[in-house]
Every structure is written in structure tokens, then in C-alpha cells.
Amino acid sequence: MLRAGDCINCEVSWQATGRSMSAGTGDLLLRLRVMTLFWSIIKIITEVFSMQMFNPPHPGTVLKDYLNGVSVTDAANHLGVTRVALSRILNGSAAISADMALRLADALGTSPDLWIGMQSQYDLWKASKKRRPKVSRLVSV
């Protein structure tokens, strides 16, 4: 097994066999270990970002936190929507549309992708919990 100080001495000890290798071979092994570690990290990052959240909150719940004490009426007027429309989003009974995501991004200094992403995660999670018919894989002829 390579140790941190082994490459500095121009000779690498291979603990498992007790043999020594030249610096060129040791450099190659070190590079292979670094590349293996690098790709392991990339794989972990990819898996983490592709995972679906378990029971994600409705974006309206998050929006309540962003409004931080601003009344529904004032926020609705500022966004240019009705109080009822905003209230339905805040209570989780209506989804955030692309238009609303753009309005929220402008008003709150966020990105529209934040709101659309939260809505998509919520919708996917809800859909995955419903019963649906079995669909087989489509194979081209």
C-alpha cells in the first residue's frame, strides 16, 4: 500500500510484498490511485445529485419561509396575482407554474429553476406514491 511519504524518497515500498519499486513505477501507481479516488468521488457526487428526496416539501411551504412575515395580500399584490392564487400555493393546494417561478425569482432574488425544481421533485414524489399500471419497456423493431 502506498504511503504519503513514499514518493518523496524516490523509492516506494509495497507493504504487502515487502518489495521496492523505482520512482517511475511508484509515480504510476500513485497516479492510478489518485485517478481511482477522483472517479470514486465523481460517482458519489453523481449519485447524490440524482437521488430523489424522500417526501420533499411543497414549494409553498418553502415560500412561506421566504415571505418571512409579509402578508399574503401584500405579497400577492407585489407579485401581480390574486390573494386566492397565492394562498392556494402557500397552502399546498396549487402548483408553482413557470410564470409564477419567474415572478418569485424576480421578487425574491432567487432563480426560477429553484421553484420549478422544487415543484418537479414534489410532483415526482407524489406520482411515485400512486398506483399506476405496469408499463413494459418499449423496444424498437
Image (cartoon, grey):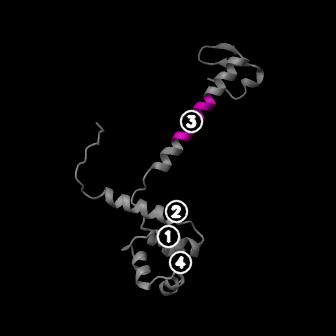
The magenta stretch is 33-43
Magenta region includes residue 15: no
Task: Give the Cα distance between marks 1 and 3.
Answer: 36 Å
Circle nearer the N terminus (4, 1): 4
Local secondary structure at mark 4? helix
Crowd band around label 1 with a 10 angstrom C-alpha radius: few (<14), some (14–19), many (20+): many
Q: Nearer the viewer, residue 61 or 112?
A: 112
- The amino acid type of the residue labelled 2 equals Asp
Q: Earlier in the sequence, mark 3 or mark 4?
A: 3
- Packing grade of label 4 (10 A; few <14, some 14-19, many >=20) is few
Residue at left offset 68%, top offset 17%: 25
Quadrant where the N terminus is found in the figure:
top right
N-terminal label among 1 and 3: 3
Disc 3 packing (10 Å; few <14; some 14–19; many ≥20): few
> Vertically, is 101 above or below 77?
above
- The residue singled out by tag 1 in the image is 101
Q: CA distance from mark 2 to mark 1?
A: 8 Å
Q: Which mark is residue 67?
A: 4
Closer-to-camera residue (18/131): 131
- Is label 1 or label 3 in front? 1
For residue 113, the mark is 2
- Percent coordinates x, y for residue 137 in the rendering: 29, 42
Q: Are marks 4 and 1 in contact (CB under 8 Å)?
A: no
Q: Are marks 2 and 1 in contact (CB under 8 Å)?
A: yes
CB-based contact (under 8 Å), mark 1 and mark 3? no
Q: CA distance from mark 3 to mark 4?
A: 41 Å
Residue at left offset 56%, top offset 40% = 41
Disc on the earlier residue, 2 or 1? 1
Residue denoted by label 3: 39
